Amino acid sequence: MPKIQYNQAINQTLHQLMKKDPRVFLIGQGVTSPWYVGQTTNGLLDKFGSRRVIDTPVSENGITGVAVGAALAAMRPILIFPRMDFMYYAMDQLVNHAGSWHYMFGGQLNVPLTVWAIINRGGEQAAQHSQSLQAMLSHIPGFKVVMPSTAYDAKGLLVSAVEDDDPVIYIDDRWLYELEDDVPEELYSIPIGEGMIRRKGKNITVAASSYMVTEAIKAADSLADEGIDVEVIDLRSLKPLDKQILINSVKKTGRFIIVDAGWPSSGIGAEVSAIVGSEAFEYLNAPIMRVSLPDSPAPASSPLEAVYYPKAKTIVSKIRELVPK
């Protein structure tokens, strides 16, 4: 099985999906710019042409309306937001239309739309170019929300998103693009709504998504020499969320930390904490802890970014607070 990078897995998947199904097309800003989308769309324009790889003007609301309309007409658009921050401009089309049409039409029409949102962090990009909006999008009825953390999952979840008959928000993080993984060449899918145990342990459960899974595994590995055995769960899907994998793990470990690279107030960490607190409370031997961004906009300074973004050492300190020596 070949080992390829995360961004290469996305590129490979796009080529294969567009070859397999003529209804699939890519639309958004910068789709023909290798730099702008992290090499994920290399070769698509040459192979499929400008009718299926559509580089658009800067008009997020208009572009989204086009994609929603195409989905209603039985196409399978992949709508890309190379900087997730600017999805705010498209919220009317997403929330009032894409997320609601299936319900409002009494189930007679589907909206098979994949919204591919890329998080850009670090590099002093500051508040308007560093946001991760997974909590906001998970709050909206009608959407499924996934955040792959590995190249293998990047491919499998993208296939599932495009083949789904409902709108799927597919969120990736540029910090993952150079990570390598074993990825089959053929198409395969990963069921939306299923988490995965990335590392088995017995002393404490750490659940995370996207790039924070990598940081959680680093934290767990660094604590192994101290005799602290950490179980790491990759949520993979934020909506629907795999509640059972969380509950089963907490039953075993008795301690729980949720790690989310979003803001804490009303965020994914709060939602997951509420689920564990209400459905696995009797198994907890310590309070639930959360790791998240500070409740403030992202700074435009490298020294401040080093403090602002949680890393493995942040998770390690929380684990040490919960696990008795």
Image (cartoon, rainbow, N blue to C red):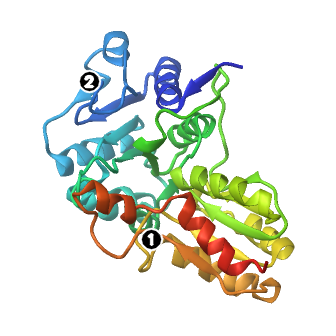
Taking the spot 81% from the left edge, 56% from the top edge, the residue there is 200
Horizontal side, residue 70 vs residue 191: left or right:
left
Q: CA distance from mark 1 to mark 2?
A: 32 Å
The picture places residue 96, in percent across and down from the top left corner, at: 30, 64
The picture places residue 48, in percent across and down from the top left corner, at: 36, 15
Name the kind of residue labelled 2 in the image.
Thr
**In the image shown, does 138 or 199 lie closer to the viewer?**
199
Q: Determine the secondary structure under disc 1.
A: loop
Which residue in the protein does label 1 denote?
Answer: 139
Please identify the quarter of the rendering in which residue 77 is found. top left
Which quadrant is the C terminus positioned in? bottom right
Horizontal side, residue 122 vs residue 253: left or right:
left
Q: Would you call the spot at circle 1 few (<14 residues within 10 Å), some (14-19), or many (20 or more)? A: some
Please identify the quarter of the rendering in which residue 37 is found. top left
Name the kind of residue labelled 1 in the image.
His
Which residue in the protein does label 2 denote?
Answer: 32
The picture places residue 76, in percent across and down from the top left corner, at: 43, 36
